[in-house]
Each structure stands twice: as C-alpha cells, then as structure tokens.
Image (tube, helix red, strand yellow):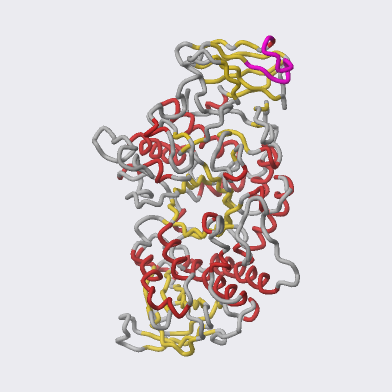
Amino acid sequence: MTGERFWDRFGAHPEAGGARFGVWAPNARRVQVAGDFDGWDPNRATELSRDDATGCWYGFVEGAGQWDRYKYRVLGADGMWRLKADPVAFHTETPPENASRIFASSYRWQDTDWLKARREAAGEHTRLPMSVYEVHLPSWRRGRSYWDLASELVEHVRRHGFTHVEFLPVMEHPYGGSWGYQTTGFFAPTSRLGHPDDLRHLVDELHQAGIGVLFDWVPAHFPRDAWALARFDGTALYEHPDSRRGEHPDWGSLVFDFGRWEVRDFLIASALYWIEEFHADGLRVDAVSSMLHLDYSRGPGQWEPNVHGGTENLEATALLRRLTDEVHARHPGVVMIAEESAAWPGVTRPTAEGGLGFDLKWNMGWMNDTLRYVVREPVHRSHHHHDLTQPLSYAFSENYLLPLSHDEVVHGKGSLAGKQPGRRQEQIAGLRGLLAYQWAFPGKKLLFMGGESGQPAEWSEAHGLDWPTANEPERHGMARLLTDANARYREHPALWRRDADPTGTRWLASDAGANLLAFARFADFDEGAALVCVANFSGVQIRDHRIAMPWPGTWHEVLNSDAAVYGGSGVGNLGAVVATAEPGTASGLEASALVTVGPGAVVWLAGRFSPVA
C-alpha cells in the first residue's frame, strides 16, 4: 500500500469489458467479488489473486461496470466467510443498504482560477479573513440534494458573506444520528444526497462563488458494523488488537491501529483523496485529543502506557505530523484544522519545531468560557467577569479558530438564541451582541447553521433548520446583523491581519461592575488602522462611558448590534465618537472617548492614525 493516490490501485475501476478490483486483506484465505454482475450468486463470484508480498488481492471481473453494486466475499483467517463492503469504495448504496458501487467520475471542474489563488495564498492563513458557516448537509433543508444545494446553499452563504463553509462529515456513514462522525466510507461521499459527481458540482459552485470548502474528516475511530472495516479479514486488521487501545469507551466504536503502516497509509490516502478528488480547501480533523492521549476517557487499568511509560500515543502523533506535512507539501494553501480540546502543546507549531503542524486549532476554551458567561442573567455576570476576560490570556498560544459549533446547540443544550437569558427579544439582542463580539475577538470565526437567524429551537438532524418566515422580523434582523458583520469584517484588516500576533490586540477597558469591556485590534503598522470593540453585556444601556482609545481623532461607528435596522433599540453614537488627547489614562494610552452602548450590545469603532488630532 502507498499513501500516494493508492485509490488508483484499490477499490473498483471500470474498464473496457468489465472492472478491476483491489483490496488489502493479508490474513484472508480467499477473497472473491460478488455483485449485480453475477446475480450475487456465491457460486459465480470471481476469485481474486493474492500478492504475497503485500497481502493485497487483485482481479478483473468481466461484465462489471459503472453503478453496479458489489461486495467482497472474504474467507477469514478464522475460517469464516464474511460479506464486506469495499474499504476504498468510491460510491455506495443509500443507507440502510450498504453495498459498494462501481463509480468512475466524469466531472469536469471549472475552478482553475480558485485553485491557483489558493496556491498563491499558501502560508497566509493567519493573515487572511476566515468566517466559516458550519453545515450538516442533510438537514440544512430537508430533502435537498447536492445539486439543489449547489444553488440554494451557495446563494445563502454568498448572501451572508461567509468566506468558507465547513461540512460535517460527508463521508458515508450507516447511522444518520452520528452526523457522519462514525464513518464507514473513507473514500465515498454519502449517497443520501446524490452521487459523487453531484458533490463535486456543489464544491465547484462554491469555489466559483468565491467560497472555500472545508470537510470534517474522522481518522480517530470507526463503527463496529460487521459489513464494514471491523475484523475485515477475520483479524483485527484496521483496529488495534488490544481493547485498551482498539476500543473507544465513549462512542462504542473501534480505534485505528496507528502503529500499523498500512493503516497509516490508508488514512493519509483518505485525507489526500478529499483534497485531490473533491478539491477540499481544508480538513478539520475531528477528535484529535482522543488520538493523542492513550488514557483519553479511560480509568486506571483501562489503558496501556507507551514504550516510555507515558500517556502520549506516539504512533498517532507521528501520523498527524506526517499528515500535515504531506498535505502542505502536495497541496500548498490547503488548511489543516484540529479539533483538540486537551491543551496539547504546539498543535499549530510546525513539525520541524516539534509541533503537530496544523494551521489552525478550534479554540474550545474561548467557546466554553464565553458561553458560560453569556448564559447567566446580566445581574449575575459581574461576578463571573473572569470568564469573559480570561480567553485573551491564551488567545495567542496557538493559531485559533473561534467555534460556536454544532456540539453547542444539540442534545438539550438549546439554540444559541435560547441560551440567552430573558424574553425572546432580549435573547435575540443578546445573540446579536455575542456574534458581534465573536467577530471582533482575535481568531478566525465559525458559526453553525441556524445561528445566523437566531433559530429558537435547538438543532436536530431529524428535523433540520427552522427557517424564518416573513412575520419574524427579529430573525431577519439577526441575519442582517451577521451579514453586515461579515462585510465589515472583510473590509477591516485590523480584524484578521494580526490574529496570531499578541501585539495586534490590546485591552482598553474591563469593568466587571458594568459588565463592560473594550479592546482594540490593529492592522499592520504601515496600514495605520485599528478597530475598537466595546461590549456591554449588562441589561441596561450605558451612556457616555469613557473608554481609552489607541489615538486621538474621529472613530466611526461601523457596526452597532443594537441598531434599529437589526431590530434593536437604536441606541448608539450617531455615527462616530471623537477621541481626545488625555495623557495618563488607566490603560497607558493617550486618548479617550465617551461611548454609548445599548443593552446587551456591541459596537465597533474604526479609526486611522493621523498625526493631527
């Protein structure tokens, strides 16, 4: 097996007169192919030939062709026959059916300019804007296909001004309630929404609209389904044979044997496949913490130490470093993102410096601290002001993306709007303020679908989104606020140019009693631009509060989450404030301004440096 386009050697490939097959099953006694082409008759199944040097089986099946269903009949090392789906299938039946399908793409891409621009921007991920709309495709609008989404979803994302979409795993999975995180088709997009070229069309349309595409990808574990990877050749082949390493206690799934080079090649090839064959602009690697720690969710006696007696999974660490290195070497400009929640040091540090080599990491700390603060009644928030201020103490320890993700709006946690205290109008106002605050805070941005309109109900994959109607003005105001925030975000380099630079952000005010804080974001020095974010998380308006400012002059109000156009009370600063020279302010800066902020609101004030006040 090889990590470089090994999908050209494995899986099913239609050719003149039939199709050729290749599968890895080193401990199998015999391997056959059965399918539509032989009526699924075991007596007519085609025998594959074994390559003793690799443990792979190959063969040609006459009469097999595009769209045909098939499975491997594997006589395992234990003497049992098993009917198995292809680990490298490119297409599948629609669940709950689980046969593989022969499929060769005929799609012609139209995104050459996009890919060229992506390569040219390689290495600039921390200095470019990124606001991500996270989407579970099957439930965004129930009943829509990839082809439908190529018009409806693309227009929605473009209209709201997001730079990227992130798809919850599109890889085939038997249980819809896993949202794709229990993958069986590591090379096959789910057929629930169409065939693989339909997904290619969706990605292509997003690219032509100027929108990047990120895929969630799950190398940490896989489900136990008997027809899939589990005990593929009658032995623990893909999974680790020791249950202390090979079984996941939280998810009831099996853990890959990261120490086996063939398994590592399989996973590296899967990652490259989605980049090369589906033009993914990045992969968000799920559950990285569970891969890195041998004692993850395990008690004493339930885990096996590494060779040094420690808890680090050395084989998984090596896999992740190889993964990020290979992706960056082969596809400059593709972004690798880690969901890592256990504070592993150096997740976004280059591998040459001992890091894991990811470009970005989800800032789970920011998400947890901030949500823990905003769910409280305003009268109680002053006692928990540290939850709001603490995230800035670690905001530059990695290259971060700030997520308000699917995990926070499901299984009884409530919607983002529903987390806010108060009546419906106050909840919507609170959510407008939260998103304006998130968009100003250092780090890239991610919002799960439904948050853009203040959906009142928590998300359910079975129900889908609750789309606003014409008689819900507060939700339309919410959507307009986010659209404007994305537009202003792109327009002001201060909000993204120095995300990873601690000197690019500075505290201006932190008043626990008033539930108020303010900070400044700075663009590059030669741009002479800054943006000040003032957040009022109290339940009352704050008028003429003196805030330290980076320099004297006029600061224009470019966003106000309490503006009447968004359904707010209209409290604001009449378009601008004037900062005056005032040596010796508490912040050490030499200017300040009187700022007014509505209840639960956030305002952005933009200014450019001028030597004349």
Q: How many marks?
A: 0
Q: Which span of residues is magenta-colored?
A: 33-43
Most foreground residue, 263 or 226: 226
Residue 20 position in % (x across, y down): 63, 17
Residue 58 position in % (x across, y down): 57, 15
Residue 226 position in % (x across, y down): 56, 27
Q: Residue at x 66, y 40 (%)?
A: 109
Q: In the rendered image of this protein, does residue 243 appear above or below residue 564? A: above
63 displayed left or right of 265: right
Q: Residue at x 58, y 19 (%)?
A: 82
Q: Residue at x 65, y 59 (%)?
A: 158
Question: Where is the C terminus found, in terms of image quarters?
Answer: bottom left
Q: In the rendered image of this protein, does residue 416 appear above or below residue 318? A: below
> Seen from this angle, which residue lies furthest right?
470
Q: Is residue 404 visible?
A: yes
Residue 561 position in % (x across, y down): 56, 76
Q: Is residue 129 visible?
A: no
